[in-house]
Amino acid sequence: MSDLLSQKLYLASDLTDGEFAILIESDSFDEELRRLADLVRRSYYGTDVYVRGLIEISNYCRNDCYYCGIRRGNHFVERYRLTRGEILDCCRIGYELGYRTFVIQGGEDTFYSDEMICEIVSAIRELYVDCAITLSLGERSYRSYKSFFDSGANRYLLRHETADSEHYVKLHPPEMSLDNRKRCLFDLKRIGYQVGSGFMVGSPYQTTQNIIADLRFLQELQPAMVGIGSFISHHQTPFSNFRSGDLKLTLRLISILRLLFPYSLIPATTALGTIDPVGRELGILAGANVVMPNLSPVNVRKKYELYDNKICTGEEAAECRHCLTRRIASIGFNIVTNIGNVKEMKDKCS
């Protein structure tokens, strides 16, 4: 049965809701899912694993999401913001280390106006014409996204977190809207960004049907990048006593996502490395092909704590690229630092 379902997903890149539920809820399919996901990933990307230099520019956030350590209501966070000069310095260091993609990420911090973001993006684009610029700055207007794109940004990451409206309201305050989050994602696609989305695995109140709704939404969106990570609780949030997500389920879903979206860029996230010392390696073996080491200044890395015990030193530091290269090589893959655009969908027989 496991071989038949896995093969069906491999050949058709789809299953019925009932079949997805069977795959998601059992570990008996994991070995075959990993094998097929690896086969598909190699057909598109070979053994290449793309590295993105992550710059976390601010841990201020206007939102009060119940799961997030930098939520507005957490008054124990030591807040920080990077200046334009500090951000450009991070890019300079990253470029010298060989990175050709910068990911500018932060909480939804209204301090950074559209004009400021455009100035930062334009400066990066002027200095590093051969680099990709990815933004991950939350929900903005169509006009804002268009201005960032026109200034030189190529990609935008915005995880939808959950595609089920009833589940969404259990994770977010009333002023936030799943409809608006989806609107943002489709706006980004219309503008021309390579768009990334994704969801938490094992978040409070999540059901198998919620996960299936996430997969269906991603099928509708057809993102270039799909990022998932296990929910990890933070001790200063309303969800502090909830159990964190399961590593095995997250790895299973990475394999399922690779079979659903063969062309996609799928990160082995920091959350995987936080749950397990070799979590990112396991994510790559399951079908992921992106890692995002941290280029942020050392003195702020621990302050961008979305969840407890987030790794932010050692191989997570972008400066230790040779360490990460060795670890990835030990499982048979090759770190590459080029911009690594998403591949086009192709016929499985080609």
Image (tube, helix red, strand yellow):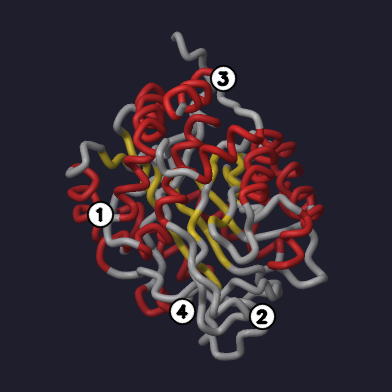
Whichever of labels 4 and 3 marks the residue nearer the N terminus, that label is 3
Which is in the foreground here, disc 2 or disc 1? 2
**Is 86 situated left or right of 221 in this image?**
left
The answer to whether one can see residue 45 in this image is: no
Q: Disc 4 and disc 2: Cα gap in Å?
A: 14 Å
Q: Around disc 1, counting alpha carbons within 10 Å, would you say few (fewer than 14), some (14 to 19), or many (20 or more)? A: many
Name the residue that disc number 3 marks: 12
Q: Can you say whether 296 is above or below 123 in the image?
A: below
The amino acid sitting under disc 4 is: Lys
Q: Position of residue 201 (x, y in %)?
A: 54, 55
Q: Around disc 4, counting alpha carbons within 10 Å, would you say few (fewer than 14), some (14 to 19), or many (20 or more)? A: some
Q: Residue at x 74, y 42 (%)?
A: 186
Q: Secondary structure at mark 2?
A: loop
Whichever of labels 2 and 1 marks the residue nearer the N terminus, that label is 2
Residue 303 badge: 4
Query: Dots 2 and 1: beta carbons under 8 Å?
Result: no
Q: Secondary structure at mark 1?
A: helix
Whichever of labels 4 and 2 marks the residue nearer the N terminus, that label is 2
Q: Disc 2 and disc 3: Cα gap in Å?
A: 43 Å
